[in-house]
Image (cartoon, helix red, strand yellow):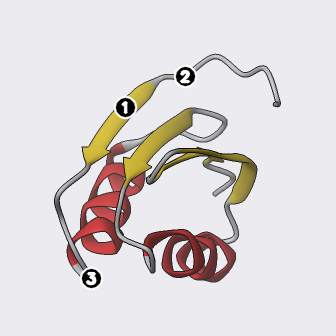
């Protein structure tokens, strides 16, 4: 797992498409360049959807970890 200072945390557990992506976009829009967002979600589609969002925004997915049915993603804001 990548070690990174987490600047913001977003809990999307219990939310389903498209809410995790919308909430992730809203958080990223509030952040400064080089800040890191931690997103936790249990929607099976969240990982691929959030990866696509990060690519679209030119942000970087630093790590993805899965524990039971929860996916935790670290996203670095690049722009």
Q: Earlier in the sequence, mark 3 or mark 1?
A: 1
The alpha-carbon separation of the residues under discs 2 and 3 comes to: 24 Å
SS under mark 2: loop
Instruction: Provide the residue designation for mark 1.
Output: 9
In this view of the protein, which residue sits in the foreground, 16 or 32?
A: 16
Q: How many C-alpha atoms fall within 10 Å of the one at disc 3: few (<14), some, or many (≥20)?
A: few
The alpha-carbon separation of the residues under discs 1 and 2 comes to: 7 Å
Q: Between tags 3 and 1, which lies in front?
A: 3
In this view of the protein, which residue sits in the foreground, 53 or 45?
A: 45
Instruction: Find out whether the residues at labels 1 and 2 contact each other: C-beta distance under 8 Å.
Output: yes
The residue depicted at 18 percent of the width and 64 percent of the height is 15
Instruction: Find out whether the residues at labels 2 and 3 contact each other: C-beta distance under 8 Å.
Output: no
Instruction: Provide the residue designation for mark 3.
Output: 17
SS under mark 3: loop
In this view of the protein, which residue sits in the foreground, 43 or 37?
A: 43
Residue 21 versus residue 63 in the image, above or below: below
Q: Between tags 2 and 3, which lies in front?
A: 3
The alpha-carbon separation of the residues under discs 3 and 1 comes to: 19 Å
Q: Is residue 26 left or right of residue 35?
A: left
The residue depicted at 82 percent of the width and 30 percent of the height is 2
Q: Residue furthest right?
A: 2
Instruction: Provide the residue designation for mark 2.
Output: 6
> Where is residue 35 shown, x and y percent of the image?
58, 32
Q: How many C-alpha atoms fall within 10 Å of the one at disc 2: few (<14), some, or many (≥20)?
A: few
């Amino acid at each position: 797992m990548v070690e990174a200072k987490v600047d913001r945390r977003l809990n999307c557990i219990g939310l389903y498409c498209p809410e995790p992506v919308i909430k992730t976009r809203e958080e990223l829009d509030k952040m400064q360049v080089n800040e890191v967002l931690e997103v936790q979600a249990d929607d099976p589609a969240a990982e691929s959807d959030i990866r696509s969002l990060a690519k679209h925004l030119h942000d970087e997915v630093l790590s993805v970890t899965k524990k039971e049915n929860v996916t935790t993603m670290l996203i670095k804001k690049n722009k």
